[in-house]
Amino acid sequence: MLITSILFSQENKKDSIVTIPKWKVNGQFTFLFNQSTFTNWKAGGDNTIAGNFGVNYDFNYKNGDWNWDNRVIIVYGLSNVKDAGFRKTSDRFEYNSLLGKKTKKDWFFSFFLNLKTQFSRGYDYKPTPRVAISDFFSPAYLSFGPGMLWKKSDNATINIAPASTRFTFVSDEFSGKYGVDQGENTKIALGFSLSAYFKFKIFEDVTMQHIFALYSNYLQKAQNVDIDYQVRFSVPVNKYLSMDILLHTLIDDNASSKVQFKEIFGLSVKYTFHRK
């Protein structure tokens, strides 16, 4: 969106109309690549090519005491290992929407909405043959509810929602998994939600980004808290290249009894745009 401030002045200069921009858009497209090749390498190793494509798109609205922040996160990655073929390494779609009405200084009454899912079918490759464990919108998580928002800036926010609703969706194939009862496709929960976003420079050329989400279901095992935590380090090489490290931790006993952890490191090609 491109919104331009326009000033109209009459000859007598008594009347004027000013249109103030209310939308601010920031977007970043990233392609992260890593590759390993071995030729007569006595220590062993398999040739590997891997790539991750990512989109981080923010569109935020401000008008008086009203604040409406929206963020879309898309990540998809594949790897090709010799003799193993292509395998999915990353698959994520997330939409966050946060509406706030300012009360005082950095505090807002808020209402949030969050949707998480993936694009394509996922497999566990340990069994033979492989076993499908997920698919498009299976599972999918939809959360929403009122709360309080602390917002220092677009790069420093914390939202607390003590009475949020959460839906979990699965297809017939995965009924009975991800906390959904056997024979059902949907599960509803009522619980406590906390989300936070921080982005800042830790050194002159090193940026750190934190995305944190916590959820506790009042209706079932409230002590088993779900945690989704992402940390990204970016070190720019030039305008379009950077070295990136992504650390992603998941704790969700409905999906796995173990802590899930993923690390991705590589050279990124980035394109960033801003519109005000």
Image (cartoon, grey):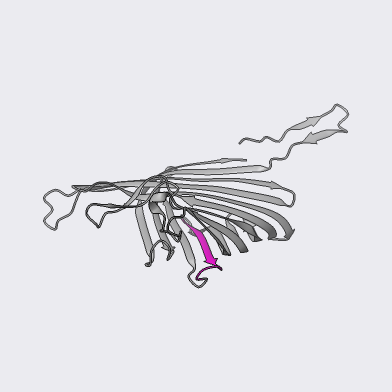
Q: Residue furthest front?
A: 183
Residue drawn at (74%, 37%) of the image: 19
Q: Position of residue 261 (x, y in %)?
A: 37, 62
On screen, residue 130 versus residue 255, left or right, reads left
Residue drawn at (42%, 53%) of the image: 235
Q: Is residue 220 magenta?
A: yes
Q: Residue furthest top?
A: 11
Q: Quadrant of the N terminus?
A: top right
Residue 12 seen in the current view: yes
With respect to residue 5, does 34 lie above or below? below
Q: Provide the residue span drawn in magenta.
A: 207-221
Q: Position of residue 50 (x, y in %)?
A: 30, 47
Q: Is residue 163 magenta?
A: no
With respect to residue 100, does 21 lie above or below? above
Q: Position of residue 114 (x, y in %)?
A: 55, 53
Q: Quadrant of the C terminus?
A: top right
Closer-to-camera residue (254/116):
254
Q: Position of residue 135 (x, y in %)?
A: 39, 48
Closer-to-camera residue (168/225):
168
Q: Quadrant of residue 255?
A: bottom left
Label count reads 0
Residue drawn at (39%, 56%) of the image: 245
Magenta: predominant secondary structure element? Answer: strand
Closer-to-camera residue (171/20):
171
Closer-to-camera residue (234/107):
107
On screen, residue 137 versus residue 22, left or right, reads left
Residue drawn at (46%, 50%) of the image: 117
Q: Residue furthest bottom?
A: 223
